């Protein structure tokens, strides 16, 4: 009987399920959108039951859209948006809405932790630089403001919530837990770290930690009826989306690097050595990956949503112009033409893409950070500003990559932004490194499928799984003259953002009073 793997990727706004063969070919895909609720401009939540329903529909669509028989799916694993808190009560029901990683309600708490030294005291144990949407901060906020929701509860993460509904298992893995308070070297909860965060009173809320390749159960009869999966199909714990996506593009060995150009902008570099000091201090994350490696990660809160925002507010004319080309002409192909028509540097306009409600989290943490264009004159056009957004996101990725003290020669790029050849070349030029784009689209789901394959014994290791399933589609080499010019613009980009925090704080204070 043929053997296939299913990976489930519960993203921030879209839940996806994909079926792969053991060579990594994506055979089918299902996807369902999930609405994000914003009670205020700085809060972000999701209804947990809505997320589960979306997962069941995505799984069913993936099965029905393929020629694969459900009984031929031999292993399943999930990944999902990291951080935030997904709390269930003693009856296994949601204890309030999920609070997402983009949420900003704990911003004042984060500012206080940085000011009083809390972050520094725990950083070399955890490798964790918390931000407003980090589980440690949100658990503390809930303890201080909604303690009744933690009574008898278990805090999960997004992938764990889906797997709980698939199998009945209440657990997480060290990758998701690493953004809450573990000793990252031993990969276990640390009471000392929890004490630093004031979370010792909620130790019982934190779930058991299991290895990503551990089987956590089989598909229940109820889940089988909802999804079309076969009852008893093995489900493996899996990892958070940062590590799963890294694996899905081939980051399996020390020195491998990934940049995700998606809802968040994530930069990861694999390492097998945590014997020394973790640098830079107090920012980013160290996340357990394979049994012998960790991921050093930096994550911009907002990446492609910067372009989404710009097109929502100012993109009508671009759409009209693209439509005039005829129905066979892609809107995003037209945007590529527009961007290419503007000189490198956007004629002196710089864009800082801090559009998330929770501000920014890497390579600096500032809940009050806000986006901006600088350098605009009356001679600039919407075309210039469009290219500035493309370049600004690339500057943000470089800001994160430059902060990680590891030599990186090649960057594996994934996410929606990697679909654009023009944007991919901009990234190569801004980063000054070769950019390679792996074949496929669902890299988080593929990473989850590789983990399931290792757990089921189809692959001996993460390395073997990545080698067997990841292929390169396109390569982009940096153009030296462009990189030299971008180096100068990038220095101005960084000088501006280092000067802005006092102004951001004042603006936030006035806005919240108003």
Image: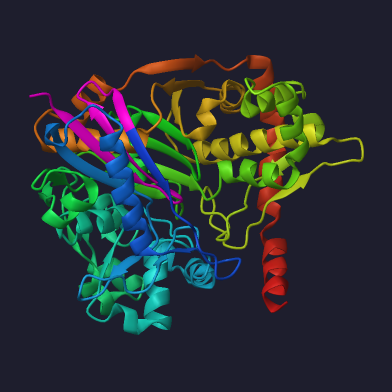
Which sits in the foreground, 500 or 316? 316
Q: Position of residue 206 (x, y in %)?
A: 24, 67
Magenta-colored stretch includes residue 222: no
In percent of the image, x 39 and y 76: which residue is there? 142
Q: Is residue 362 above or below residue 197?
A: above
Q: Which image quarter holds the N terminus?
A: top left
In percent of the image, x 22 and y 53: which residue is there? 163
Q: Position of residue 477 (x, y in %)?
A: 54, 15
Q: Position of residue 290 (x, y in %)?
A: 22, 38
Q: Residue furthest right?
A: 378
The answer to whether residue 30 is seen in the rendering is: yes
Classified by dominant secondary structure, the portion drawn in magenta counts as strand
Which sits in the foreground, 119 or 92? 92
Q: How is the image coloured?
A: rainbow
Q: Residue furthest bottom?
A: 148
The answer to whether residue 172 is seen in the rendering is: no
In percent of the image, x 37 and y 33: which residue is there? 442
Q: Which image quarter holds the C terminus?
A: bottom right
What are the residue bounds of the magenta stretch?
1-28
Q: Is residue 74 above or below residue 500?
A: above
């Amino acid at each position: 009987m043929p053997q296939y793997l299913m990976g489930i990727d519960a993203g921030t706004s879209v839940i996806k399920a994909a079926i792969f063969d053991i060579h990594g070919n994506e055979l089918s895909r299902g996807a369902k959108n999930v609405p994000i609720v914003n009670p205020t401009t700085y809060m972000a939540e999701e209804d947990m039951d809505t997320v589960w329903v979306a997962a069941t529909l995505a799984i069913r669509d993936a099965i029905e859209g393929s020629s694969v028989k459900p009984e031929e799916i031999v292993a399943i694993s999930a990944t999902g948006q990291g951080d935030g808190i997904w709390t269930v009560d003693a009856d296994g029901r949601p204890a309030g809405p999920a609070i997402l990683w983009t949420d900003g309600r704990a911003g004042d708490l984060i500012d206080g932790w940085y000011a009083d030294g809390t972050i520094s005291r725990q950083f070399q144990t955890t490798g964790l630089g918390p931000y407003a949407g980090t589980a440690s901060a949100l658990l503390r906020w809930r303890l201080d403001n909604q303690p009744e929701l933690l009574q008898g509860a278990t805090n999960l993460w997004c992938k764990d919530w889906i797997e709980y509904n698939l199998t009945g298992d209440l657990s997480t893995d060290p990758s998701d837990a690493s953004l809450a308070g573990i000793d990252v070297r031993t990969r276990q909860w640390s009471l000392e770290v929890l004490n630093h965060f004031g979370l010792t009173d909620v130790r019982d809320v934190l779930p058991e930690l299991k290895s990503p390749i551990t089987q956590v159960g089989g598909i229940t009869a109820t889940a089988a009826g909802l999804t079309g999966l076969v009852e008893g199909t093995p489900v493996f714990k899996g990892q958070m989306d940062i590590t799963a996506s890294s694996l899905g593009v081939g980051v399996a060995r020390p020195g491998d690097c990934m940049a995700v150009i998606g809802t968040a902008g994530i930069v990861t570099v694999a390492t097998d050595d945590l014997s020394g000091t973790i640098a830079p201090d107090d920012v980013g994350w160290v996340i357990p990956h394979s049994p012998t490696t960790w991921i050093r990660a930096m994550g911009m809160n907002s990446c492609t949503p910067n372009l989404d925002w710009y097109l929502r507010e100012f993109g009508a004319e671009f759409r009209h112009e693209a439509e005039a080309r005829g129905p066979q002409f892609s809107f995003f192909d037209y945007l590529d033409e527009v961007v290419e028509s503007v000189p490198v540097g956007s004629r002196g306009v710089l864009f800082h893409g801090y559009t998330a409600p929770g501000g920014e989290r890497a390579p600096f943490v500032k809940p009050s950070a806000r986006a901006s264009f600088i350098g605009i004159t009356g001679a600039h056009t919407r075309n210039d500003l469009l290219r500035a957004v493309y370049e600004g996101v690339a500057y943000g990725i470089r800001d994160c990559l430059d902060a990680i003290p590891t030599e990186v020669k090649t960057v594996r790029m994934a996410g929606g932004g990697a679909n654009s050849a023009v944007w991919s070349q901009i990234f190569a030029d801004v980063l000054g490194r070769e950019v390679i784009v792996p074949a496929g689209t669902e890299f988080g789901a593929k990473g989850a499928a590789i983990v399931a394959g290792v757990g089921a014994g189809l692959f001996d290791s993460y390395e073997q799984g990545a080698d067997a399933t990841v292929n390169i589609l396109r390569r982009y080499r940096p153009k030296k003259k462009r990189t030299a010019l971008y180096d100068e613009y990038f220095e101005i980009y960084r000088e501006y953002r280092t000067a802005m925090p006092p102004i951001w704080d004042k603006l936030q204070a006035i806005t919240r009073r108003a």
